[in-house]
Structures are given as C-alpha cells and as structure tokens.
Image: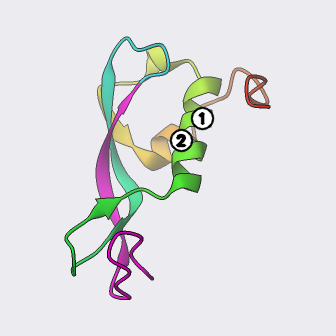
Amino acid sequence: MVCKWCESEEAIVSPESAYWELPDGTRAVEIKEVPSVKCPSCSMIYVEEDLIGEIEEQMMLINTRNLPKEFTFEDLMEQPRLLKKNYFNL
C-alpha cells in the first residue's frame, strides 16, 4: 500500500481508534478498530476518504443518541438505519 503523505510503499492497513463528532454536534465519540492506513516511514495514521464518507453517511442515517461514548467500527456499521439513504447527499 502506498502512503498518501510520503508515498512510501511500506504503508499497511491497521485497525486504529478515531474520534468523531456526531452530525448534530452534541458530542464526540471514539470509534475503535477503524480500518486505517499506518505508515512506518512517516508515522502518519489516517483514514482514507472513501471510508470517511461511509462513516459520515452511517452517522447521518442512524439514531446517534443510542451510541455509547466508545464503540467499534463494526458496531457502528451494524446499527439499524432510520432512512434507506442519505437524501441530503446529492
């Protein structure tokens, strides 16, 4: 895998914690085991844009009041959706 920051080919996929603000801005949560890119060459750890989009969309479609302060990525993606799709995303 190629690091988007330093272009090293040593980057790997690694489950990492990420902190996210809920769409309504009421609080932040910790999402554990988010598939992330970790680069040993430049020490960057980041979540790729397409996965950020998936997380953001899921947050828009679920009842975030039911979320605890911390949970896994898998737990987030398994939450039942209130809407079938995000009608705000054109």
The one of 20 and 79 positioned closer to us in this rendering: 20
Q: Which residue is mark 2?
A: 55
The residue positioned farthest toward the front in the image shown: 6
Corner quadrant of residue 58 = top right
Q: In the structure shown, which secondary structural element does the residue marked by tag 2 occupy?
A: helix
Report x, y in % for residue 71: 35, 38
The one of 79 and 50 positioned closer to us in this rendering: 50
The one of 89 and 82 positioned closer to us in this rendering: 89
Q: Which residue is drawn at the image coordinates 53% and 54% (left, top)? A: 49
Q: Which residues are magenta?
A: 1-21
Marks 2,1: beta carbons within 8 A:
yes
Corner quadrant of residue 15 = bottom left
Q: Which residue is drawn at the image coordinates 48% and 49% (left, top)? A: 74
Q: Is residue 43 left or right of residue 35?
A: left
Which amino acid is tagged 1? Gln
Q: Which residue is mark 1?
A: 58
Let me know if residue 27 is in the magenta part: no
Q: Is residue 13 left or right of residue 30?
A: right
